Image (spheres, rainbow, N blue to C red):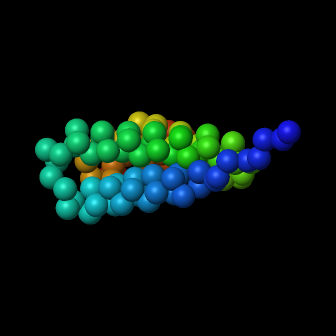
Amino acid sequence: MTLGPIASGLPLGSFGLVAAATITGVQLLGLLPVSASKAIGLLLFATVLVQVIGGISCIGGRDVIAATLMLTFSVHGSSPRSSTSSNPWTASRPSACGTWHSPR
């Protein structure tokens, strides 16, 4: 008796990735008020969980490339932003030597 692979979790992980990208894009365009930051954070946390579940189910579905991508995207998406500015275009950015500077 052998155990067959489960269905791929790639659609679930992709849904989480698209949802996170859409929420982040709408926020960066300024279409959401600043007062909605807490709700946006909770939605992004939910999309990270969806990507982790999708990545783990990709492992069960023997799709290691999709599992690696989904779990990498979920870890990258859950890292805190290095900028404290609300405007990403004027935020502090690292220079070529790795030190931080503010725009002029």
Residue 23 location (% of width, % of height): 32, 55
Of 66 and 28, the residue lying toward us = 66
In this image, 22 relative to 32: left or right? Answer: right
Residue 17 in view in this figure: no
Task: Depth check: give the residue in front, 14 or 6.
Answer: 6
Instruction: Specify the farthest residue to the front.
Output: 1
Q: Residue at x 54, y 58 (%)?
A: 11
Is residue 50 rendered to the left or right of residue 104? Answer: right
Q: Residue at x 51, y 46 (%)?
A: 51
Asked if residue 35 shows in the view, the reply is yes
Residue at 69% across, 42% down: 60
Quadrant containing the N terminus is: top right
Residue drawn at x 38%, y 39% is 45
- Does residue 12 sit above or below 43 in this rendering? below
Q: Position of residue 65 (x, y in %)?
A: 71, 52
Above or below, 48 relative to 17: above
Identify the image quadrant of residue 97.
Answer: top right
Res. 22 image quadrant:
bottom left
Tell how many labels.
0
Q: Residue furthest right?
A: 1
Taking the image as shown, residue 2 lies to the left or right of residue 16, namely: right
Quarter occupied by residue 19: bottom left
Query: Can you give x and y, in whole percent of width and height, for residue 43 in the image?
Result: 32, 44
In front of the other: 64 or 96? 64
Q: Position of residue 66 (x, y in %)?
A: 66, 53
